[in-house]
Image (cartoon, helix red, strand yellow):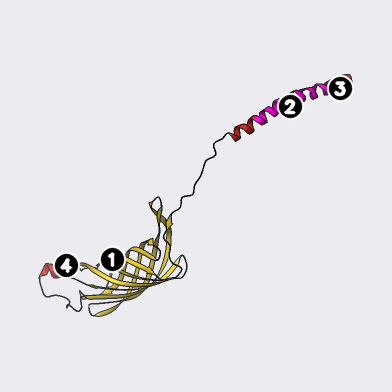
């Protein structure tokens, strides 16, 4: 029994002796935390170009259209779009170009295969677009532009070589919103339609590269 009481007194004695050290350590930790450098984080304010709340857009575009077996020529047109949601939009496109000579005409030096009127090309397309990769482009420390990489696909009609031709169009584009309600689009499209200039119907891939200025309203 006496040994047990001695053990108990010894434990309490050790705890009492360690208490000042514990308090000193706690006080030291508090002082150390108080003396830590507190970083001053300031939020950087910048101007961000946004699409207006309205969902319609109109665009004027120009670029080049490479008609298969013909020259690459200037194409101009207009687009009217409606943004169904943040991800999807529908678009109506009209474009026109004047097609040059075929490689056969240039090499043979013979009679032209098409008249001047038949070389005028026009197309209408109704497309569905999908905003694939939205992002941001930081121009300066205080200015950033919203960007998006989008895909589009649609159907329509191309008038060329004296006939109306069913057309499938699909493409990829990059949009940069450089001011509220304005954007610059760079787009590559493939217009697929059949033509029979050389006597047989054949499906042709006609590549178009354009830049457009868009206004949202």
Residue 202: horizontal and vertical position, in percent? 26, 72
Instruction: Quickly name the residue at label 2.
Output: 19
In the rendered structure, the answer to whether residue 28 lies left or right of residue 209 reads right
State which tag comes first along the sequence, 2 or 4.
Answer: 2
The residue at the point 44 percent across, 67 percent down is 52
**Numbered tag placed on residue 103 in the rendering:** 4
Extent of the magenta region = 8-27
Please state which of the two labelled residues, at mark 2 or mark 3, is closer to the viewer: 2
Which corner quadrant of the image does residue 174 belong to?
bottom left
CA–CA distance in space, label 3 to label 4: 113 Å
**Numbered tag placed on residue 207 in the rendering:** 1
Q: Nearer the viewer, residue 156 or 200?
A: 156
CA–CA distance in space, label 2 to label 4: 99 Å
- Residue 204 drawn above or below residue 3: below
- Residue 86 drawn above or below residue 6: below
The residue at the point 10 percent across, 70 percent down is 109
């Amino acid at each position: 029994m006496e040994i047990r009481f001695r053990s108990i007194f010894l434990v309490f004695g050790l705890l009492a002796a360690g208490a000042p050290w514990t308090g000193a350590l706690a006080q030291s930790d508090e002082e150390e935390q108080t003396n830590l450098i507190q970083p001053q984080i300031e939020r950087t304010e910048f101007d961000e170009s946004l699409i207006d709340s309205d969902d319609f857009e109109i665009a004027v575009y120009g670029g080049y259209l490479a008609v298969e077996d013909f020259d690459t020529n200037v194409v101009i047109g207009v687009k009217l779009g409606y943004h169904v949601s943040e991800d999807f939009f529908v678009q109506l496109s009209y474009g026109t170009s004047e097609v040059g000579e075929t490689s056969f005409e240039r090499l043979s030096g013979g009679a032209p295969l098409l008249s001047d009127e038949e070389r005028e090309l026009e197309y209408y397309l109704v497309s569905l677009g999908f905003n694939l990769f939205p992002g941001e482009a930081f121009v300066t420390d205080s200015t950033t532009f919203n960007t998006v990489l989008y895909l589009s696909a649609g159907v329509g009609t191309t008038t060329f070589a004296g006939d109306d031709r069913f057309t499938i169009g699909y493409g990829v584009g990059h949009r940069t919103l450089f001011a509220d309600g304005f954007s610059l689009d760079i787009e590559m499209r493939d217009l697929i339609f059949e033509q029979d200039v050389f006597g047989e119907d054949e499906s042709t891939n006609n590549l178009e590269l354009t830049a457009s200025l868009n206004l949202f309203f």
